[in-house]
């Protein structure tokens, strides 16, 4: 692959942007929502169905894949795209966040992190260099720099130290990544909720130079207000001509607020995880399909939705298969949720392109305020 | 629906038969294998995918559906076809077998069976009349007469008493079913492994008159030899111009042997249940995808199979997702197994039509004797 990775900005509306990321594996329309395919599968979905929802790219987790089936094995089998039957672009995270949130027995040094696998307790090591190697073996199209994410709550001194370590690791990630035409390396801004630290981080990353920039260290339980507080200024510290990625976000209203503040890419397990626990997301907010009020309801989850769950099934059916513990429950609700998320992204892209984002957002909130439709 | 239910026999080869059952909801090519959609879903499959494997009809379980979500609710929602998004024919069993095998606290009288639900312990009653009512509420295309199935082991006296009770219930089922153009009622032959009892049962059923006839009381743990022993003579007791249905069978070699002996229809949970536990069925027998020998194997389960699991994934991937507990494991292996079963049925139909069933069966056994292909 020698074709270049590039980003074309098509239109802006306030701080919001819409454009296209070009990769040798296909175009990514922005703002983009990336479904999460943690262990080589978007849970409960066939990859063709993920593509059918409108997803241009999905996210794979370095941490999970390095432990099982291992990056070396995936490489021998022809790379992650072939392994999981997803020919479109894949972004892989660096593993840093999952080491912090999932593994046991961590030991952090300047060199990297030693940790115990949550699968079998075996010992592993991740560093900027090893993370770059793993993501190369996986065949990732968009590679994330290896960073450190302090556990919350953390005081400003700890956040500053962690950010500066992440910036040294960003340089090492850049050096280890080398020159790989058609593949992109994104840096990750840290600095918590302190504008000066965010600015320092952005300046350092821009100096190193990346193909895109992530806003890291949010979506770790700080709440929407604090997150929007950072997003009110942090994206402005980053180069305008590169994609801006908000990691691990979020609920539909988080996504809308982030796009309003200049974010181009997001990912979250929420639509797929919710789908497996009987939670559906619709234009009117969240619907708990477990609720007995759906038991006799012949209507679809959302009469305007064109996903298979809404086209072909009643709420009564979705309620029944959830209660009966049938796999089709998670399959249909996950499909619906991913479809809804992608429809929301298309709505945002169209609204930005037409310069009517403000009206779109007003309607988005108004419909949610009405709440889910009442049973007959 | 006023279109008639009918059966056209196209060709025979020895005792084996191939033909078409016509119903208002579509044609059923025989010999037919019916996937089992117990509780309103073929587990781990979208109904469109079940149809894509080549299934013309599926089976629904009266026992499960009467308990949850209830036949009355399904009727209010427009019937089982609409409820589960399966527009093609559905056969429903009578509930008798599941009451015997799944429920607790049974009480059997001439009138019917009182039993406790395996879901919540609530008390329920099934009789020929109630079973006919439930199957009508479900909207079943092929309704099964309500019968009693003695638990094994059972002596000949108990088997004879049970068979005669089932014959009285067959008459009550026929009376309660009434005249429903486009819908069929099948009687169920009982009599264990005693030819005289089988003959008596068949004579009684033929006298009552049904649209099709099932061979019941097999596939209850008696083994293939005993089953084939009964199938060597029992189908011959039944009218030639009506479909013959062997309930709850079976493994691929059971199916081949049953078709050789004149059976037209079968159903079994095996392909779907196996798929969820990491077992695949191929032309070369059973493959346990959990086995470590698949961990690095880039080849498909079966290089000649055209199902999505074989077209798009390696054994290494199927092994990985099973080990990781991912839902796509059950989704892909179930799809493969159902595809393999339907391909086998198509092979049998073609072979019978061409008068080369014997050669087909010889090759079927020869490939299985070779066993699964060795890893590279």
Image (cartoon, coloured by chain):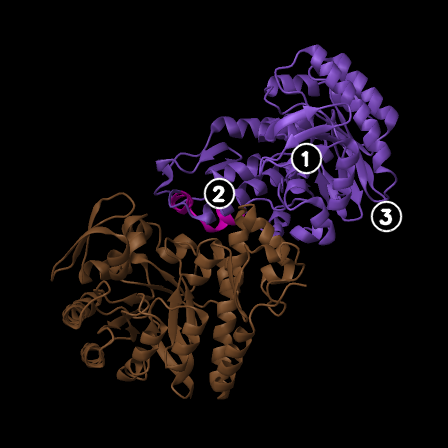
Chain colours: A brown, B purple
Q: CA distance from mark 3 to mark 1?
A: 35 Å
Which segment did they paint magenta? Answer: B307-322
Res B3 label: 3
As helix, strand or loop, the secondary structure at mark 1 comes to strand
Residue with the mark numbered 2: B303
Instruction: Specify whether A15 is left or right of B149.
Output: left
**Residue B310 rendering spot, x and y as whole percentages:** 49, 46
Camera-nearest residue between B262 and A68: A68
Please, is residue B76 above or below residue B284 in the view?
below
Q: Residues within 10 Å of mark 3 (few under 14, many from 20)?
A: few
Please, is residue A152 above or below residue A70 in the view?
below
**Mark 3 or mark 2, which is nearer the start of the sequence?**
3
The residue at 73%/45% (across/down) is: B138
Instruction: Specify whether B183 is left or right of A60.
Output: right
Q: In which quadrant of the rendered view does residue A184 lie?
A: bottom left
**Residue B343 rendering spot, x and y as whole percentages:** 61, 40
Question: How would you classify the magenta stretch by its main secondary structure?
Answer: helix
Instruction: Specify whether A310 is left or right of A54.
Output: right
Q: CA distance from mark 2 to mark 3?
A: 43 Å
Camera-nearest residue between A104 and B301: A104
- Residue B312 painted magenta: yes
As helix, strand or loop, the secondary structure at mark 2 comes to loop
As helix, strand or loop, the secondary structure at mark 3 comes to loop
Please, is residue A234 above or below residue A151 in the view?
below
Please, is residue A51 above or below residue B121 in the view?
below
Residue B241 seen in render: no
Residue with the mark numbered 1: B124
The residue at 48%/88% (across/down) is: A355
Marks 3, 1 in one chain: yes
């Amino acid at each position: 692959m020698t074709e270049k990775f590039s980003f074309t900005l098509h239109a802006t509306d306030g701080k919001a942007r819409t454009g296209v990321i070009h990769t040798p594996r296909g175009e990514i329309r922005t703002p983009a929502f990336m479904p999460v395919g943690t262990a080589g599968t978007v849970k409960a979905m066939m990859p063709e169905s993920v593509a059918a929802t409108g997803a241009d790219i999905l996210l794979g987790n370095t941490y999970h894949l390095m432990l099982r089936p291992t990056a070396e094995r995936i490489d021998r089998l022809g790379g992650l795209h072939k392994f999981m039957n997803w020919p479109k672009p894949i972004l892989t995270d660096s593993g840093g966040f999952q080491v912090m949130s999932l593994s046991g027995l961590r030991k952090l040094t300047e060199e990297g992190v030693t940790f115990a696998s949550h699968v079998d307790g075996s010992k592993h090591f991740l560093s900027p260099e090893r993370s770059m190697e793993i993501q190369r073996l996986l065949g990732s199209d968009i590679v994330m720099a290896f960073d450190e994410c302090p556990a919350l709550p953390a005081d400003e001194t700890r956040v500053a130290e962690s950010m500066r370590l992440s910036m040294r690791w960003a340089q090492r990630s850049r050096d280890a990544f080398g020159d790989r035409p058609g593949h992109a390396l994104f840096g990750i801004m840290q600095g918590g909720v302190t504008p000066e630290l965010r600015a320092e981080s952005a300046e350092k990353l821009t100096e190193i130079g990346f193909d895109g920039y992530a806003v890291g260290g949010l979506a770790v339980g700080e709440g929407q207000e604090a997150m929007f507080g950072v997003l009110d200024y942090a994206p402005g510290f980053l180069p305008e001509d590169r994609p801006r990625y908000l990691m691990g976000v979020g609920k539909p209203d988080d996504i809308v607020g982030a796009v309003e503040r200049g974010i181009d890419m997001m990912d979250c397990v929420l639509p797929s995880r919710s789908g497996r626990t009987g939670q559906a997301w619709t234009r009117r907010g969240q619907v708990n399909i477990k609720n007995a009020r759906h038991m006799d309801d012949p209507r679809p989850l959302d009469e305007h939705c064109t996903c298979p769950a809404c086209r072909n099934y009643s709420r009564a059916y979705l309620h029944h298969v959830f209660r009966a513990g049938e796999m089709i429950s998670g399959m249909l609700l996950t499909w619906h949720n991913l479809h809804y998320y992608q429809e929301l992204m298309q709505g945002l892209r169209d609204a930005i392109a037409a310069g009517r984002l403000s009206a779109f957002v007003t309607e988005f909130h108004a419909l949610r305020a009405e709440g889910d439709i009442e049973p007959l």
